[in-house]
Amino acid sequence: MARIGIALFLAALLIFVAGCTGSSPPPAPQIRAYTPQTTILIGSTSVNPQVLTVEKGVTVTWLNIDMGLHTVASDEGDPDSFVSYPLSTNDEFQWTFTLPGTYGYHCTDNPNIKGTIIVSS
């Protein structure tokens, strides 16, 4: 009789433990994914890549990986002008290029940070 009681106790314990450990784990933290072919990383002194070639209609993303504020502004005279708000660390700015051409851009606070987008048709 004692063995049956111990067996029932162990079975109940196993069911209890299984119920406690069966809960799903917390969701994984969201990591910002970026596509290297259409993303430009803004650093403290430069952008990477400095020259990016995309097809017409593609959206380019600039991602500030620096601790300082940066902006993205098209050079004067570009047919498809754009300017971002000040980007903090991990902020991003996106622009869809609708016209073929070559587009220079720079940071308004640090004009040495500059690059070029080449848009093909």
Image (cartoon, rainbow, N blue to C red):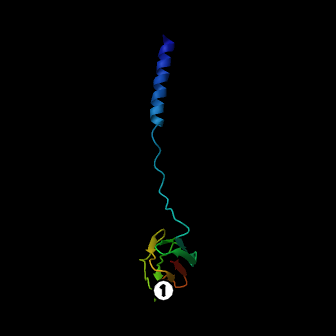
Count of numbered tags: 1
Please tell me which residue is depicted at 49% across the width and 14% down the height of the picture: 4
Q: Secondary structure at mark 1?
A: loop
Q: Is residue 41 visible?
A: yes
Please tell me which residue is depicted at 49% across the width and 12% down the height of the picture: 2
Q: Is residue 106 visible?
A: no
Please tell me which residue is depicted at 51% across the width and 62% down the height of the picture: 33
Label 1: few (<14), some or many (≥20) within 10 Å? many
Q: Which residue is mark 1?
A: 75
Side of 96 relative to 117 (left or right): left
Residue 87: image quadrant is bottom left
User: 105 or 22: which is nearer to us?
Assistant: 105
Farthest-out residue, left:
85
Q: Is residue 27 above or below residue 86?
A: above
| Percent x, y of residue 81 | 43, 83
Please tell me which residue is depicted at 49% across the width and 80% down the height of the picture: 100
Q: Amino acid at mark 1?
A: Asp
| Percent x, y of residue 85 | 41, 77
| Percent x, y of residue 102 | 52, 83
User: 13 or 48: which is nearer to us?
Assistant: 48
| Percent x, y of residue 19 | 45, 33
Farthest-out residue, bottom:
77
User: 47 or 55: which is nearer to us?
Assistant: 55
Q: Is residue 4 above or below residue 47?
A: above
